[in-house]
Image (tube, grey):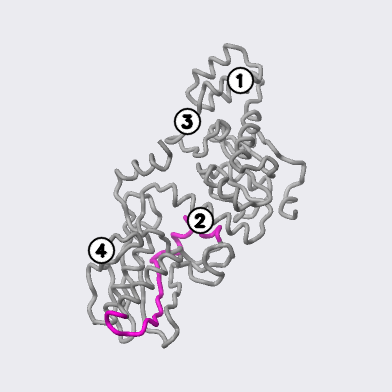
Amino acid sequence: MSDDTENTKQSSKLRRGWTTGACATAATKAALTALATGSFPDPVEITLPKGQKTAFALDYEDIQENQAEVGIVKDAGDDPDVTHGALVKAKVRFGARGDGIRFFAGEGVGTITRAGLPLPVGEPAINPVPRQMMTEVVNELASKYDFAPDMDITISVRNGEKLAKHTWNPRLGIVGGLSILGTTGVVIPFSCSAWIHSIHRGIDVARAEKLPHVAGCTGSTSEKAVRQLYELPDFAMLDMGDFVGGMLKYLRTHPVPRITIGGGFAKLSKLAQGHMDLHSGRSQVDFDWMAERIAELGGDDQMQQQARDANTALAVLQMADAAGLDIANKIAQLAKARALDILRNPDAALDIVIVSRKGDIIARAGQDTEPKGHSQDA
């Protein structure tokens, strides 16, 4: 069974929700309908990109002589989405004839300040698919109520600037608030694809900025250690998490001159074994494999058996350390080899950094003798 299939089966047991893009589209339709007819449809029904129809209740309504505004509370279902419960608002007003549909960032919606994202610098962070959904709504209603499809649409999110601090937006160069996202309109709980998509956008930004060095880490402790080691800027740090395969496969076709992978001993042991998803629910440390590595380092039969009987990778590390066996370095070297296999480039400039739970670097593979910061000036 593939990880994607497993993830889909797990997600199917949980309640799905709606993206900010779907909420913004529904709010736009309700506001524009009110502007055209004087009445707000509640609930308002929209068609999602894959053809599903869904209805949204209105939480906020306001109409004036030449503009209308609607707010819809986002329901992310059972996904731990930072924007769950946020009020997404769309304000619509008729624009000048010939201007077409224009999008604006209201309060709580970010603005793009770095190249590499799907929209140009200076544009509101309203992604292409939500823009297309709202455009289709405008064209539909313009035809139905016989008005020109020249419309100014302003999207805002209550407390969006505060919520954005808990997202990847600051690293991607999106300032002032959240992004209006969604490719299907549906939030799949604990979606791997959403996380991997964010990794890809981080790589796109790094390439557009011509960064010579990026790093992906499994968590905040390893990220802090790696960032300090190489004095990397914030937006050079990719939020890899468990998805080392998703990061490396994208880097295979969208290369960056130098790559660092940082993480704890257990996670990188799984990479060394060949796993591309390091989540505990989707891959496990193989202790028979660990015993073989102990043997290669000169560990006797008793130590090999202790490794087989261990219930955590940390226990193997501690046992090896006590015996003077440098298993951390062994794992780093093997993890590097596996990562290069995924990149399909044995000559890629890649290094592995293994970090303890306390944040100390305990092993490196592929490191050079450059001083700190040199890689930024390469």
Q: What is the spatial separation of the Cα atoms under label 1 and label 4, in whole angstroms?
A: 59 Å
| In this picture, residue 109 sits left or right of residue 57 | right
Q: Which of label 2 and label 4 is nearer to you? A: 4
Question: Which one is in front, 355 or 39?
Answer: 39
Q: What is the spatial separation of the Cα atoms under label 1 and label 3, in whole angstroms?
A: 18 Å
Sooner in the amino-acid sequence: mark 3 or mark 2: 2
The residue at which mark 3 appears reads as 284
User: Whole-percent x and y of residue 346?
Assistant: 67, 40
Q: What is the spatial separation of the Cα atoms under label 2 and label 4, in whole angstroms?
A: 29 Å
Whether 199 is drawn above or below 122: the answer is: above
Label 2, residues with CA under 10 Å away: few <14, some 14-19, many ≥20 = some
User: Whole-percent x and y of residue 169?
Assistant: 51, 59
Residue 343: quadrant of the picture: top right
The residue at which mark 1 appears reads as 294
Sooner in the amino-acid sequence: mark 1 or mark 3: 3
Q: What is the spatial separation of the Cα atoms under label 3 and label 4, in whole angstroms?
A: 42 Å
> Is residue 189 covered in magenta?
no
The residue at which mark 2 appears reads as 168
Q: CB atoms at circles 3 and 4 under 8 Å apart?
A: no
